[in-house]
Amino acid sequence: MRRAALCLLWLAPLALAQSGFRVRIYHLNPPSSLTLTPQPSVHWKTCLKCAELTLGSPLIITVDHGRLRIPGASPAEMMFISGAYQLSGFQHPLLRSSFPLEIRADGQTLRLVLTMPLEEYVAAVLAAESAGPQPAQSLQAMAIAARTFAVRFRGRHSAEGFDFCDTTHCQDFHLSAITPEIRAAVEATEGELLWFQGRPAGTYYHQNCGGETADAADVWPGQRLPYLREHPDPYCVRAAGSKWQSTLDKSQIATALAAAGLRFPARWESFVISSRSPSGRVLELQFAGPQSDQVRTSASSFRFAVDRSLGWNQIRSDWYDLRDSGTQLTFTGRGSGHGVGLCQAGAAEMGREGKRARDILAFYYPGTGLGLTAQGLDWQFEGSERLEIVTTEPREDSAIAPAAESALRWAEQASGLQLDARPRLKIYPSLDVYRNSTGAPGWMAAFTYGSTIRLQPVALLRSRGILDSTLRHEFLHLLVEEHARPGLPLWFREGLVLYLSDPNAAAGRTAGNFDPLAADAALRLPAGRESAEQAYRASRDEIARLVQQNGKAAVLGWLARPAPFLLSRAGAP
Ligand SMILES: [Zn+2]
Ligand SMILES: [Zn+2]
């Protein structure tokens, strides 16, 4: 087999395992025990090179002295899980997922990290951050803001072994609440980012600015960005609901400040507002009382401390007046959130008034540019009878339609299968854009996720002489996935695609001692590129052997009606 072709043609599972965004779930409230319920079966192992096991019934995972306790297995440092599953725990909402999951012991609790594609992450962020019905254009603006934020700040938790937490510290996240409207907004803007001076912008956003956005430097000293300045917002004030009031006991406040580790005098009687920003937001508070030592604290640290301890809606913003009534303090304010960047209430109002996503982003991040690249390229939709072509350079790329259609016909002929779906061919304008917006590494020529084939620039693939083979390979994937019965092992599907791509390729050294369990595991959660390559080669050789023994028609027939050994050997249900 031609090595060059093999290592350039991975599909989604491998792309995901090696390049997905790592999101820690249950970050604020990590569980100490968890029930993992397969839907209907999952695979797991306790180290990257360990043998994979299959789980067909619920498993309760606990933690003890920094090690995972897994019934029927020895204590482990970590656990890798793949397949579709459901998680639940004491005081932890039920979560359904089919993204690879890593569980590690972290003191007396479990640390859970999901690996997911960027666009799936953006959809889950929107599900949490944009609750309630919204105009399509403001949802699209939010999708672009959330995606740009993710690309710019990826790895902000890298010292802890993941990219993002699932709280508003990074972006709030709700995997189980993705609506069709959110999917549509994410898809319509796929890969689009907001740029400033050649770099993805810092696209902060908040719920409601109260009528005037905040300067980033007032909230985070040192963050001086020209597109995050204070300016009036006539839109959110037209929508109701920006005023709020909250009354708190001083003793509750003292407890919250202590829990957050903020410096405050041992004896204080009240607070006074000691400085405000030009918009009127409180910048600093000063403790008052005979022994308060004139200690000051920043309003945002104060708000975070109180909200973390007493609930996130107690002090909704830094824009308020204070009234002291003895044992209590009353806050009367407007807006919700830090006020920096996009105001979601204002964006929704702009959408209702007919503004486009592009206008909304230009209003809240003035001076930035929208596009797939810093040069502002946009997706254009072209099509032929059998497929949709999405590209930034329709003049050049629409010429690929005949080649793509003939690759599709070739794949249908080689497999004897018919494609019912109208696939989408998405062609990226440069290797950088392909890497940034898909998360796929540069050595992966293309990959298929759902019914969309994502492709590196046509000129690049053509110059390497792999354009046609890449297209044929990806169409074979679509055909095999469309016709494969659920539960068929991954090695069978992958091996079949590779075999059909080039039935005459010479067999490798692996023929004869094939281990389906190991191959399936290495394809699903590869320990590295090399072991994945080996597994692809071995799976392909095994298909070649099966074809020699049973005939090609019989092996293809197993897609719809698997031979019994296929459902038992790789541990499928
Ligand atoms: Zn975070
Ligand atoms: Zn606003």
Image (cartoon, grey):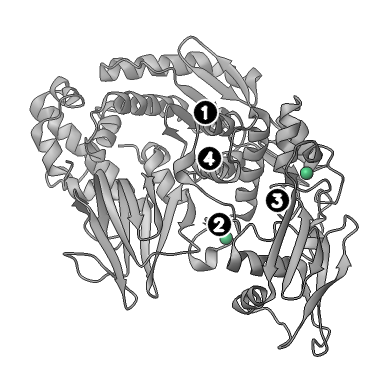
* Residue to which mark 2 is pinned: 167
Q: Inspect the image, locate mark 4, and give the three-letter code of the amino acid beneath it.
A: Ala
- Ranked by sequence position, the earlier of labels 2 and 3 is 2
SS at mark 2? Answer: loop
Tell me: is circle 2 under 8 Å from ligand 1: yes
The residue under the point 62% across, 38% down is 143
Q: Earlier in the sequence, mark 4 or mark 1?
A: 4
- The numbered mark at residue 123 is 4
Q: Is residue 335 visible?
A: yes
**Which mark, residue 414?**
none
Q: Quick one: label 3 or label 1, which is nearer the N terminus?
A: 3
Return the residue at label 1: 462
> In 3D space, how far apart are the residues under numbered discs 2 and 3 (Cα atoms)?
14 Å
Q: Is residue 548 left or right of residue 360?
A: left
The residue drawn where x is 40% and y is 49% is: 17
Label 1 residue near ligand 1, CB within 8 Å? no
The quarter in which the C terminus is drawn is top left
Q: Which residue is mark 3?
A: 204
Residue sitting nearer the eye, 354 or 502:
354
Q: Residues within 10 Å of mark 3 (few under 14, many from 20)?
A: many
Question: Residue 205: image x %, image y %?
Answer: 70, 48
**Front-most of residues 129 and 254:** 254
Give left or right: position of 444 versus 480. right
**In this rendering, the label closer to the viewer, 3 or 1:** 3
Q: Is the residue indicated by label 3 positioned so its CB lies within 8 Å of ligand 2? A: no
Classify mark 3: helix, strand or loop. loop
Which-is-in-front pick, marks 2 and 3?
Answer: 2
Secondary structure beneath disc 1? helix
263 or 494: which is nearer to us? 263
Give the residue drawn at x 59%, y 28%: 188
